[in-house]
Amino acid sequence: MPDTTAFPAFRVSLATTAEERRCAQQLRYQVFVQELGAGGAMVDHSVELEQDAFDAFADHMLVHDTRSGRLAGVYRLLRSDQADRAGGFYSESEYDLGVLTNCDKPLLELGRSCLHPDFRGTTALYHLWGGLAGYVADHQIDILFGVASFHGTNPQTLAAPLSLLHHNHLAPPALRVRARADHFQPMDLTPMQSLDRRNAMIAMPPLIKAYLRLGGSVGEGAYVDHAFNTTDVCLILQTCDMNRRQAQIYAKGRQP
C-alpha cells in the first residue's frame, strides 16, 4: 500500500483574527507580487502584504496543511451585504455588473484565490471548493462571480484560450456582464473554425478550468490589468449549476 503520510491533508476555515487575515495577505504577496509581478496602491513591500480596501469587509477562506500547519491556499469572499458596506464589489472597477446587481438575488464575489507553489497539483484547490460549497449553502447564495486572471498583459499571446471562452462559454444574456468600455478587450481573437481547442484548454489556468467544470460561464470582453500584470475575465456561476455539476463529479468518483 502507498505511504499516505507522504500526502498532505487539508483543513478549511475562515479567518477569525487579524493575524489570520495577515497570513492570507502574505501568501497573496508571495504569489501575486513576487511570483507574478503584480502591484497596487496598498501593496506593502516592507512587510510583504498584498492588500486592498475590500479586505476589511470580506471573509477570507483558508486551507491549511494539517500535518505541517502551513497555509496552502486562500480565497476572498465578498457577499452582497458586505459589498454594500464596502461601497461596491471589487469587480466593478473592471466590469459593468448591472445585470447581476439589479437581479435582486444574493451574490458572492470570489477573488484573490491562490495556492502556495508547494501545494499546486494537490487537492488543496478542491478543498477550497468544498469549503466554498458549504459557505454558499450557509448564506443561501444564488450567484457567484469574480474576475479570474491569465498571467500577462498581451491578449494576442492569449488568443486561443480567450477565444475558446468567447465561442463556447459566454454567459446567457441575463447574466452577461461586460468589460468596461474604456478597457474593453475583445476575446473573439481567433475564428472558431481555426481554433485548436485542445491547446486552448491546455493554456487555460486551473482556476478557470475548475469554474468551467462546475458550469461556469464568462462575461463579454476581457480586462487588461497592467497594475496587476494580468488579463482578466469575469466568471459567473449559478449555484444551482454548481450543485448539479458537483453531484455528477462526486457520483463519477464513487463508481468502481
Image (cartoon, grey):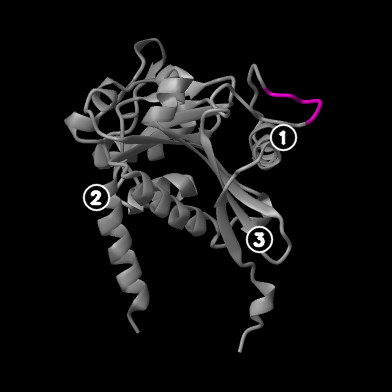
Q: Is residue 70 above or below residue 192?
A: below
Q: Are marks 3 and 2 in contact (CB under 8 Å)?
A: no
Q: Is residue 138 left or right of residue 166?
A: right
Q: Tell me, for residue 240, which label it has, or none.
A: 2
Amino acid bearing label 1: Gln
Residue at position x 66%, y 64% in the image: 66
| Residue 126 image position (x, y, % from top left) | 48, 58
Residue at the far bottom in the pictured view: 1
Label 1 or label 2, whichever lies nearer to me, is 2
Which residue corresponds to mark 3?
65
Q: Is residue 222 above or below residue 17?
A: above
Which residue corresponds to mark 1?
34
Q: Is residue 12 left or right of residue 186?
A: right
Q: Is residue 40 above or below residue 6?
A: above
Span colored in magenta: 43-47
Residue at position x 71%, y 59% in the image: 69
The total number of labels drawn is 3
- The answer to which quarter of the image holds residue 252 is bottom left
Mark 3 or mark 2, earlier in chain = 3
Residue at position x 48%, y 45% in the image: 205
Mark 1 or mark 3, earlier in chain = 1
| Secondary structure at numbered mark 3 | strand
